[in-house]
Image (cartoon, rainbow, N blue to C red):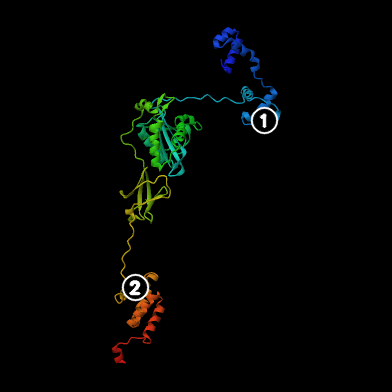
């Protein structure tokens, strides 16, 4: 017999003795030695917990109310205010006997037949993506009987993402249950709550095409969908730790593999089998999917901006520049953006997921503008073909002038026409040597070259004179 005798055995010995049983009968009934029975009965009086006196009960009720039900704090208050040391176990017994702390209500249990019900919910999770810590919305659906789980992540969870998730979940389960239990989220519920909840018409219609209907549980009663509440903690503690992801596509590939290889393959204690094994039993009872599944897309009307883009969810997608300023129809799919004009497709892009203010451009939509080859100005053409030094000086003068440099070229041409060619070219070569591009100083150099011969007179002018 161990040295520490459980309280239940001690109480049983005392009860049997009070019923008039002999030591031999008690020993045989409880499989104890007679000496152990004698020792328990001998110490019975010492083991009795003192009862709570009325004055102490009043103090206990007051301290219990001020301490907010914290028994450790009640023990401190009684010791400080009344100078009475009460053992913690004695204090808890007094509280139970006084009815100050009500026992928790008996927990219920929900039992489901194969194919009877499925449950859906979402939860925000912190995870690492592309080296950054972000919050992603974890969406999950579980079959209530087999507990087969399907999980996906989204940067946000609107009705568009909800339709995509439900469609993928139905494909994963290869069928649906007639009832899908949800909470009172505005994504699914348009008005009301619980039994009076009005499911949003577009979500109800989408669910009907897959063969099920939504049912919201009572407010403050999350246990009604306990099958889906518990897996979220499992995902956070088993899937997310020590994992990082490149993007949402990579995240959803990894979590789907985890659902198949871990969550649905591990044996469930309540089932005494894995969820995948239980799914084999449940599969014949599921509502089969229709031959043609409903597409998930959102129709948007946009006008192509002056830069040749349309905006969807803060991100921009390129359109051929000939459609700038025109109205187009945008089809937003879960993983693609399709842009149409009068029924004809004019652009297609992969959808930018989990990004904001990003841009996706197709090179053919916005070709680089080709600068037109401009014909040289008449002044520039008149300065060419006379002398290499003059051409270099004109090119350098044009490069340093504003715009096309027409005013400077006209002034240079005027100087060339005014003065003799020899002194003019000599002055140009001297200006090039010293980097002088002030045409006033160039004219001064020309005047020094002519040495007083300001005008060039032809023979006909001399004869006339």
Relative side of 86 to 135, left or right: right
Q: Point out the image quarter for the N terminus.
A: top right
Relative side of 181 to 464, left or right: right
In 3D space, how far apart are the residues under numbered discs 2 and 1 (Cα atoms)? 102 Å
Residue 408 placement (x, y as % from top left) = 38, 74
* Quadrant of the image occupied by residue 152: top left
- The local crowd at label 1, few if under 14, some if 14 to 19, many if 20 or more residues have their Cα within 10 Å, is many
Identify the disc placed on residue 392.
2
Identify the disc placed on residue 77.
1
Element carrying mark 1: helix
Query: Which mark is nearer the camera, 2 or 1?
Result: 2
Residue drawn at point x = 34 percent, y = 58 percent: 368
Residue 41 placement (x, y as % from top left) = 62, 12
Seen from the viewer's position, the closer of residues 32 and 333 is: 32
- The local crowd at label 2, few if under 14, some if 14 to 19, many if 20 or more residues have their Cα within 10 Å, is some
* Quadrant of the image occupied by residue 397: bottom left
* Quadrant of the image occupied by residue 401: bottom left
In the image, residue 424 sits, relative to residue 35, either above or below, namely below
How many numbered discs, if any? 2
Element carrying mark 2: helix
Residue 202 in sight from this viewpoint: no
Residue 95 placement (x, y as % from top left) = 63, 24
Disc nearer the start of the sequence (2/1): 1
């Amino acid at each position: 017999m161990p040295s520490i005798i459980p309280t239940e055995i001690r109480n049983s010995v005392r009860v049997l003795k009070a019923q008039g049983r002999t030591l031999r009968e008690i020993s045989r009934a409880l499989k104890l030695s007679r000496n152990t029975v004698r020792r328990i009965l001998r110490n019975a009086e010492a083991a009795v917990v003192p009862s709570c006196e009325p004055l102490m009960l009043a103090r206990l009720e007051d301290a219990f109310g001020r301490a907010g039900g914290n028994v450790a704090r009640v023990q401190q208050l009684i010791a400080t205010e009344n100078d009475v040391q009460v053992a913690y176990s004695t204090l808890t017994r007094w509280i139970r006997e006084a009815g100050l702390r009500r026992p928790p209500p008996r927990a219920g249990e929900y039992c489901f037949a194969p194919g009877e019900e499925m449950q859906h919910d979402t939860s925000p999770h912190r995870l690492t993506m592309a080296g950054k810590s972000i919050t992603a919305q974890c969406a999950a659906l579980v079959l209530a009987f087999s507990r087969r789980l399907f999980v996906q992540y989204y940067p946000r969870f609107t009705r568009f993402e909800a339709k995509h998730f439900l469609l993928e979940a139905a494909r994963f389960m290869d069928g649906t249950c007639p009832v899908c239990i949800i909470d009172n989220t505005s994504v699914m519920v348009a008005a009301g709550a619980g039994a009076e909840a009005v499911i949003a018409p577009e979500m109800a219609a989408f669910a009907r095409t897959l063969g099920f209907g939504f049912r919201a549980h009572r407010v403050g009663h999350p246990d009604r969908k306990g099958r889906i509440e518990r897996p979220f903690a499992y995902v956070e503690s088993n899937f997310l730790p020590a994992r990082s992801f490149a993007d949402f596509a990579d995240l959803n590939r990894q979590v789907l593999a985890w659902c198949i290889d871990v969550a649905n393959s591990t044996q469930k204690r309540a089932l005494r089998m894995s969820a995948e094994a239980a799914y084999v039993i449940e599969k014949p009872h599921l509502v089969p999917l229709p031959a043609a599944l409903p597409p998930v897309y959102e129709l948007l009307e946009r006008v192509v901006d002056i830069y040749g883009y349309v905006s969807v969810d803060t991100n921009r997608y390129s359109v051929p520049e000939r459609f700038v300023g025109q109205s187009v129809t945008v089809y937003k799919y879960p993983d693609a953006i399709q842009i149409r004009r009068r029924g004809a497709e004019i652009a297609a892009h992969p959808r930018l997921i989990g990004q904001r203010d990003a841009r996706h451009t197709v090179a053919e939509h916005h070709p680089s503008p080709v600068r037109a080859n401009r014909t040289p100005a008449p002044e520039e053409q008149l300065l060419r073909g006379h002398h290499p030094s003059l051409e270099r000086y004109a090119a350098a003068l044009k490069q340093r002038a504003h715009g096309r440099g027409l005013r400077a070229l006209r002034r240079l041409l005027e100087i060339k026409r005014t003065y003799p060619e020899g002194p003019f070219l000599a002055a140009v070569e001297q200006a090039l040597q010293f980097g002088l591009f002030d045409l006033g100083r160039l004219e001064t150099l020309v005047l020094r070259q002519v040495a007083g011969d300001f005008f060039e007179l032809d023979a006909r002018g001399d004869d006339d004179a």
